[in-house]
Image: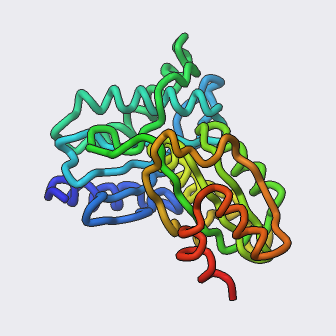
Amino acid sequence: MAEPAREELSALAAIFCGPDEWEVLSRSETDGTVFRILTKAEGLTGADVPLELVFHLPLNYPSCLPGISVHSEHLTRAQSVTVKEKLLKQAENLLSEPMVHGLVLWIQQNLRHVLNQPDTGSGSAKCTFATGTIVDDGLWLTLVHLDHMRAKTKYVKTVEKWASDLKLTGRLMFLGKIILILLQGDRSNIKEYLILQKTSRVDVDSSGKKCKEKMMSVLFETKVQTEHKRFLAFEVKEYSSLDELQKEFETAGLKKLFSEFVLGLVK
């Protein structure tokens, strides 16, 4: 990562130092850094709208645009996409210089105006994870393992909604304590899903308080040829035996995936 980007990260950590305002989600020598900032901005009614902004700084940032995701329980999915589009448009004017703090300030000052524009909620733009980087998009298949679900009914409905919003197909699979999610779809949308899974308060902890998914792991991902599309819809399934689960994978042409990544989870 370039020195200006490292300096910017240090500055952001100092600026957003309040409770839960700042969190680094991942660092990678190949994919860069992903972090989230919690802030507020004036909405249409004049009340403050909590915003969760997730930024992905690729290795060649700020020579290229960051990836941006916007989440808020007070905005519709379409409104969140519109806010993201406007932030990326603003980022184009700041290319080649550290821009995250400037973008946060801009949306703090302009959220009401953005939401009030006639095109708000078009949702026509494709969700992207790292605009400006060279990403091998197209149809991908990702296998995710979850450690547990305490608030199962709510959690399942949330996963189904995310999959529907992001046009992902696949399976949410339960076998005893084993919980697996197979996602098939555009790679950028799968990345968007994984950010939602990591940053949203989707479950509850042992005391019943809402909490984030901290024990999710991506077991496998690969590109899939369009003609080899495995799933036509997203379904939730429960299995009574390991053989039943194995048959699900074999039917989808994923026998090797099952033997290499799922069998090891069975204790």
Nearer to me, 247 or 134:
247
Could you say which quadrant of the image residue 152 lies in? Answer: bottom right
Which residue is rendered at x = 30% and y = 51% of the image? 57
Is residue 29 visible in the rendered image? The answer is yes
* Vertical order, 45 against 15 (above or below): above
Nearer to me, 44 or 79:
79
Which residue of the protein is positioned furthest toward the top in this rendering?
A: 118
* Vertical order, 256 against 1 (above or below): below
* Vertical order, 157 against 31 (above or below): above
Which residue is rendered at x = 20% and y = 58% of the image? 7
* Vertical order, 135 against 94 (above or below): below
Q: Position of residue 191 (x, y in %)?
A: 47, 50
Q: Position of residue 104 (x, y in %)?
A: 39, 40
Could you say which quadrant of the image residue 179 lies in? Answer: bottom right
Is 85 left, or right, of 152 in this rendering? Answer: left
Is residue 206 visible in the rendered image? The answer is no
Which residue of the protein is positioned furthest toward the bottom in this rendering?
A: 267
Q: Where is residue 79 in the image (x, y as percent from the top left)?
A: 58, 28
Nearer to me, 151 or 253:
253
Dividing the image into 4 quarters, which one contains the C terminus? bottom right
Q: Position of residue 149 (x, y in %)?
A: 75, 68
Dividing the image into 4 quarters, which one contains the N terminus? bottom left
Which residue is rendered at x = 68% and y = 83% of the image? 266
